[in-house]
């Protein structure tokens, strides 16, 4: 699925590889809906909350090529807008949008720019991807420290590391496609869906391969203690059996499958009470690797203790990242929307 990050489009721009359609709306919006009855189990086998129904409300529209997200200082949402080199700050209660930082490298012709962001303390770090000369840009793929509203310091040149340390799997973009950023042990984990691996990057700029995989297309991350939880989109045609959540630690030799069945899984996130959720972009109907899922086929899913997933809400329109605050999930879509999904877990962890 990451085999074609530079495919041209006829609309405003194309976002790379996996998922991305033009920055203009890919289709008419559908209202996400919950199944009639939901009985998700927790990660503890045998523990099942009472049935409940989630509800979705549109919080934000008009973001420019929205991508990765995080929860930052003050409990605000922060969302990457790669097409315009900007990070937006969103009030999760009102949906008010302000610019947190702008002026990061962008390469809209290839869909490059700031893909994800994370905070360590009050300091923000941005993951910039697909902006190097190899893909028609003039920037550096890597992690940028945000020093001010429009000032940045490159702390790690991931593109240079990838050129010097190619993967064992097939690739054709020599700088890779860094995708998601997650704080870990004082530094960061970075997934690369083109190179099929996870890097560990220190704040001093040291880079190493944390875990390498076969062609499984690693995407979003979350961390609990020492354990890393990761979404796998799986190779084309992104069958549900290949849309997985896996877990591994710093001393693991293999990744343990936690669940499967999330078509084109793009993110994973813990909610209350160690309740784990996965974000499915939906049914892949593309012709070439890199095409996004069909419109309005995405879903927020709860990971069950028996290795299955339960749909919490579906008909999401090409979702790309997920954050959870209390019992509300915030889903960012490729079309520049943020949906708030309330009551994602029933008792004992919700309501």
Image: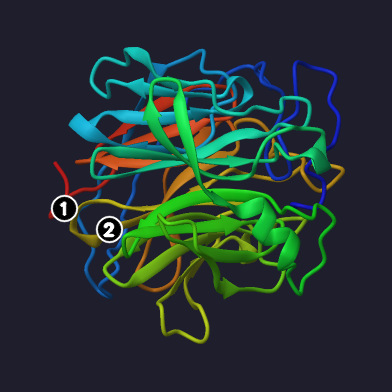
Image coords of residue 131 (percent x, y): 70, 36
Residue pictured at 34% horizontal, 45% vertical: 37
Residue 327 screen position, x and y as percent: 22, 41
Q: Report the front residue among 161 and 348.
A: 161
Residue position marked by numbered label 2 in the rendering: 275
Residue at x 61% of width, y 29% of height: 105
Looking at the picture, tell me which residue is in the foreground, 164 or 118.
164
Which numbered disc, 2 or 1, marks the residue that appears first in the sequence?
2
Q: Is mark 1 on a helix, strand or loop?
A: loop
Residue bearing the label numbered 1? 349
Tell me the element at label 2. Answer: loop
Nearest to the observer: residue 58 or residue 323: 323
Q: Is residue 347 above or below residue 198?
A: above
- Residue 287: assigned label: none
Left or right: residue 347 compared with residue 294 = left
Is residue 140 shown to the viewer in this render?
Answer: yes
Image colouring:
rainbow
Image coordinates of residue 201 in percent, x first then y, are 47, 60
**Mark 1: few/some/many CA within 10 Å (<14, 14-19, 20+):** some
Q: In this view, does 267 lie to the left or right of 41?
A: right
**Quarter of the figure with the C terminus:** top left
Marks 2 and 1, how far apart at CA: 8 Å
Specify whether residue 53 is in view: no
Tell me if mark 2 has few (under 14), some (14-19) or many (20+) residues whose alpha carbon lies within 10 angstroms of its own.
many
């Amino acid at each position: 699925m990451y085999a074609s990050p530079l495919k041209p489009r006829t609309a405003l721009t194309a976002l790379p590889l996996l998922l991305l359609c033009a920055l203009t709306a890919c289709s008419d919006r559908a209202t996400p809906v919950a199944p009639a009855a939901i009985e998700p189990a927790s990660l503890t086998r045998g523990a099942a909350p009472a049935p409940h129904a989630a509800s979705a409300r549109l919080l934000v529209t008009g973001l420019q090529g929205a991508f990765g997200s995080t929860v930052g200082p003050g409990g605000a949402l922060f969302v990457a807008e790669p097409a315009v080199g900007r990070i937006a700050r969103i009030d999760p209660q009102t949906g008010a949008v302000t610019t947190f930082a702008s002026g990061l490298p962008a390469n809209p012709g290839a869909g490059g720019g700031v893909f994800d962001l994370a905070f360590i303390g009050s300091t923000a770090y941005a993951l910039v991807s697909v902006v190097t000369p190899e893909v028609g840009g003039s920037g550096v793929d890597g992690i940028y420290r945000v020093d001010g509203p429009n000032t940045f310091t490159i702390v790690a040149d991931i593109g240079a590391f990838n050129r010097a340390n190619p993967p064992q799997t097939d690739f054709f973009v020599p700088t890779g496609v860094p995708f998601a950023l997650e704080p870990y042990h004082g530094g960061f984990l970075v997934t690369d869906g083109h190179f099929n691996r996870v890097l560990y990057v220190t704040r001093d700029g040291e880079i190493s391969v944390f875990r390498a995989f076969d062609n499984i297309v690693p995407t979003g991350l979350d961390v609990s203690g020492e354990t890393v939880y990761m979404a796998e989109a799986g190779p084309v045609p992104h069958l549900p059996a290949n849309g997985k959540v896996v877990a591994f630690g710093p001393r693991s030799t293999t990744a343990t499958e936690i669940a499967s069945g999330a078509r084109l899984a793009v993110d994973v996130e813990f909610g209350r009470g160690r309740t784990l959720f996965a974000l499915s972009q939906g049914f892949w109907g593309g012709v070439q690797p890199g095409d996004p899922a069909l419109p309005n086929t995405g879903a927020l899913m709860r990971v069950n203790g028996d290795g299955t997933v339960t749909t919490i809400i579906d008909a999401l329109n090409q979702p790309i990242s997920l954050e959870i605050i209390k019992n509300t999930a915030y889903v960012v879509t490729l079309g520049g929307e943020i949906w708030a999904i309330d009551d994602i877990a029933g008792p004992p962890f919700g309501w």
